[in-house]
Image (tube, helix red, strand yellow):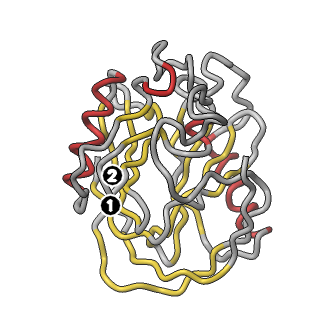
Amino acid sequence: MVVLALAGTVAVGGCGGNGNTSTGGAAVHAPAISAAPSGPTSGWGPGMWSDNGNNGMMNGGPGSRGHGMTGTWWLAGNGSRVKTLDQARQRATVFADRLGLRVGEIMQFSRNFYAELQTTDRHPATEALVDPADGAVQFEYGPAMMWNTDYGMHHGSRSTARISAAKARNLARQWLHDHDSTLMTGEPESYPGYYTLHTMKSGKITGMLSVNASSGQVWYHTWHGTYIATSPR
C-alpha cells in the first residue's frame, strides 16, 4: 500500500452548497497527508490492486460474485472519452446496475469523475470512479475498497460503528486543523463502515475525506485532482 505525502497549493473551482457550479478558482493549500495511506493517482483496470494481475484484493467480494478480478466490481471502458457529468452518469449507471444500485451525486475532477452509488431506497452504498479517458468504472480507491463493510475488501466485517456523524465531522475538522489546513467540512454521508465529507473553502467544494465509523481514522482523498463541477442526485 502506498503512503503519499502531499502538500502544496492547488487551484480549485467552486460549487455552492446547492451543487451549482461557480466559475473561477482560488489558491487552496492542500493539507500534508501522512495520517492515512493513500490510493494511487492513476491507472485503471482489474489488475489495479493486485500483486500479479490475477488475484486482486476484491476477489471474492460482493462486487466480484466469484468472478475474481474481472467481476462486477470493475467495468471495462468502451473506448469513448468521458467529458461531461451526464456522460459520467451514464457510465456509472451501467456499473451501478450490475450491483443492483442507483447513481446519486456525480462530481468532476481534473483526474477523474466521482460517483456516489446508492441503494434503491437512496441510502449511500459505496463510491466509484469513472475514468475520463475511456469510461472505465471501478470502486473508488481507499475507504470504498478498504473500509466499506458491504462492498469492500472486508465485506461482512460488521465492526461496531462507535463514531456518530457529528463525531466524524469533529474528527475531520480536527484532522484538517492538525495538518495546517484552513479547509472546512461539509455534512457527513454515512456509508457502510465509514463517512465521507466534502472539504470546503469559502463555502465551495475543494475535495473530500472519509472517517472510519469504528476507529475514527481519517483518510484524505488525494487522487481526484482539482474540483470542477457537481451534478446533483
Q: Is residue 94 left or right of residue 148?
A: left
Say what secondary structure mark 2 lies in.
strand
Residue 81 placement (x, y as % from top left)? 24, 57
Q: Quadrant of residue 28?
A: bottom right
Image disc number at residue 68: none
Which of the pair 180/151 is nearer the observer? 151
Image disc number at residue 106: 2
The mark total stands at: 2
Q: Residue at x 21, y 43 (%)?
A: 90
Q: Quadrant of residue 213?
A: top right
Amino acid carrying label 1: it is Thr
Q: Earlier in the sequence, mark 1 or mark 2?
A: 2
Question: According to the image, label 1 marks what residue?
Answer: 230
Residue 27 placement (x, y as % from top left)? 53, 87
Which of the pair 2/27 is nearer the observer? 2
Q: Is residue 26 left or right of residue 121?
A: right
Q: Residue at x 47, y 86 (%)?
A: 26
Amino acid carrying label 2: it is Ile
> In the image, is residue 92 above or below residue 65?
below
Q: Residue at x 37, y 52 (%)?
A: 131
Residue 108 placement (x, y as % from top left)? 35, 61
Q: Residue at x 62, y 27 (%)?
A: 153
Say what secondary structure mark 1 lies in.
strand
Q: Residues within 10 Å of mark 1 (few under 14, many from 20)?
A: many
Which of the pair 51/125 is nearer the observer? 51
Q: Quadrant of residue 16?
A: bottom left
Residue 92 placement (x, y as % from top left)? 30, 41
Q: Are marks 1 and 2 in contact (CB under 8 Å)?
A: yes
Q: Is residue 205 left or right of residue 10?
A: left
Q: Residues within 10 Å of mark 2 (few under 14, many from 20)?
A: many
